[in-house]
Image (cartoon, grey):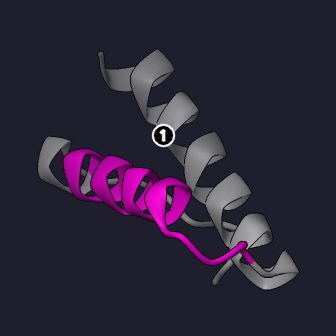
Amino acid sequence: MEKDFKITSAQHYEDTMIIIFEMQEQEDPLTLAQLAEMEIMMKAAERFEEEEL
């Protein structure tokens, strides 16, 4: 996933939050790549919250 991942709409934010939740709920342990991807998405979500909500 890109390091400059940016959420551009409320729908994109919602979809991203669902993906994060699903990753956290999966039974198998997350790989390092998945953890890094989730961290990038969470940071993008925080930026979107600060700027748009």
- Residue 19, percent from left and from top: 37, 63
Instruction: Please state, as top left, top right, bottom left or bottom right, where the N terminus lies in the image.
Output: bottom right
- Residue 5, percent from left and from top: 57, 66
Residue 26 vertical placement versus 50 (above, below): below
27 to the left or right of 14: right
Q: Nearer the viewer, residue 28 or 38?
A: 28
Q: Which image quadrant for residue 38? A: bottom right
**Mark 1, other Cα within 10 Å: few <14 / some 14–19 / many ≥20:** many
- Residue drawn 32% across and 23% down? 52
- Tell me the SS state at disc 1: helix
- Residue 8, percent from left and from top: 30, 53
Residue 28 vertical placement versus 42 (above, below): below
Q: Which image quadrant for residue 4? A: bottom right
Q: Can residue 3 be seen from the camera position used here?
A: no
Which contiguous range is marked in magenta?
13-30
Residue that numbered label 1 is attached to: 45
Residue 2 vertical placement versus 14 (above, below): below
Instruction: Please state, as top left, top right, bottom left or bottom right, where the C terminus lies in the image.
Output: top left
Q: Can residue 29 be seen from the camera position used here?
A: yes
SS majority, magenta: helix
